[in-house]
Image (tube, rainbow, N blue to C red):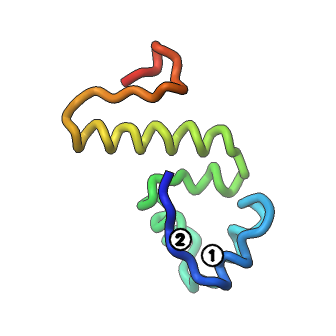
Amino acid sequence: MNKTPLSYRATMDMMGAPSSYLSTLVAASDMCPEWFADVVATHLIDPESLRESDYKRFYTDRSRQLQELVRSVMGKPTMLRDLSEGDAR
């Protein structure tokens, strides 16, 4: 997917499911939760799927968004091998 540099403290706080540590990260960021969600969204991550620890939705949505980004930059259709033929864009 992609990697985001995090502080040592943030990395240590990120143990377990996202739903268990996300509120700690929000509090440590000194941002209101809405702003934090906006920052997470800039990484093409659905904040709600993190809050709910919905891994399937997270990966499906993130893959779709990254594929769309690549397609828009390349100006050509793209296809992921893991998608069924009907899902190719």
In the displayed structure, 15 sits above or below 24; it is: above
Graded by Cα atoms within 10 Å as few (under 14), some (14 to 19) or many (20 or more), the crowding at tag 2 reads some
Q: Which mark is residue 36?
A: 2
In the displayed structure, 2 sits above or below 88; it is: below
Residue 81, position as x, y percentages in the image:
49, 25
Label 1 and label 2: CA atoms lie apart by 6 Å
Which is more toward the observer, 40 or 69? 69
Q: Amino acid at mark 1?
A: Val
Tell me the SS state at disc 2.
Answer: helix
Choose top left, top right, bottom left or bottom right for residue 59.
top right
Residue 83, position as x, y percentages in the image:
52, 23
Tell me the SS state at disc 1.
Answer: helix
How many numbered callouts?
2
Choose top left, top right, bottom left or bottom right for residue 80.
top left
- Give the mark, 1 or 2, whose residue is nearer the N terminus: 1
The C terminus lies in quadrant? top left
Which residue matches tag 1?
26
Q: Which mark is residue 74?
A: none
